Image (cartoon, rainbow, N blue to C red):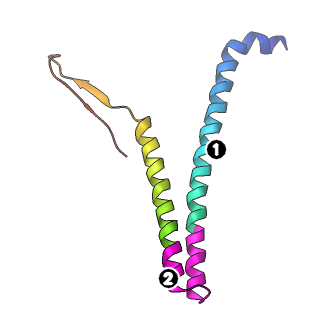
Amino acid sequence: MLFELLTFPISGPLGGIVWLGEQLLERATSELDDIQNVQKQLLALQLAFDMGDISEEDFEIQEEELLLKIQAMEEEIEAEQSEEREPEEFISEDGLSSFSITVLD
């Protein structure tokens, strides 16, 4: 107990960083799972169409909805990732000119 109190100024922030990392990992995993679930729905839809359980018209409508959903999720992830990146600013040796770039993966 005394040891925990004495080390709290160091262990407290570290515990917060660990918690934050776990939350980020959980969110990223759930987003990936969402996309994978929609892809599984798309595969199930294709199988149902191949087996003749649904008409071609119904298949095309549902397929378009699922593809748009996947596209929207991917765009949302890309937008979140681009918001996290900040432009890097470079200043020349003479200090007179500068420019900034954003590094994309």
Numbered marks: total = 2
Q: Position of residue 40 (x, y in %)?
A: 59, 69
Instruction: Name the residue carrying label 2.
Output: 57
CA gap between label 1 and label 2 equals 38 Å
Label 2 residue SS = helix
Vertical side of 35 occupied by 97: above or below:
above
Crowding at mark 2 (Cα within 10 Å: few <14, some 14-19, many 20+):
few
The amino acid type of the residue labelled 1 equals Glu
Q: Is residue 47 left or right of residue 8?
A: left
Q: Which residues are magenta?
A: 40-62
At 33% across and 31% down in the image, what residue appears?
87
Q: Position of residue 66 (x, y in %)?
A: 52, 67
At 59% across and 57% down in the image, what residue appears?
34
The amino acid type of the residue labelled 2 equals Glu
Quadrant where the image shows the N terminus? top right
Q: Is residue 23 left or right of residue 99?
A: right
Crowding at mark 1 (Cα within 10 Å: few <14, some 14-19, many 20+):
few
1 vs 2, front mark? 2
Q: Residue 103 colored magenta?
A: no
At 60% across and 89% down in the image, what residue appears?
51
Q: Residue 44 colored magenta?
A: yes
Label 1 residue SS = helix
Dot placed on the residue nearer the N-terminal end, 1 or 2: 1
Instruction: Name the residue carrying label 1.
Output: 26
Image quadrant where residue 94 sits: top left
Q: Are marks 1 and 2 in contact (CB under 8 Å)?
A: no
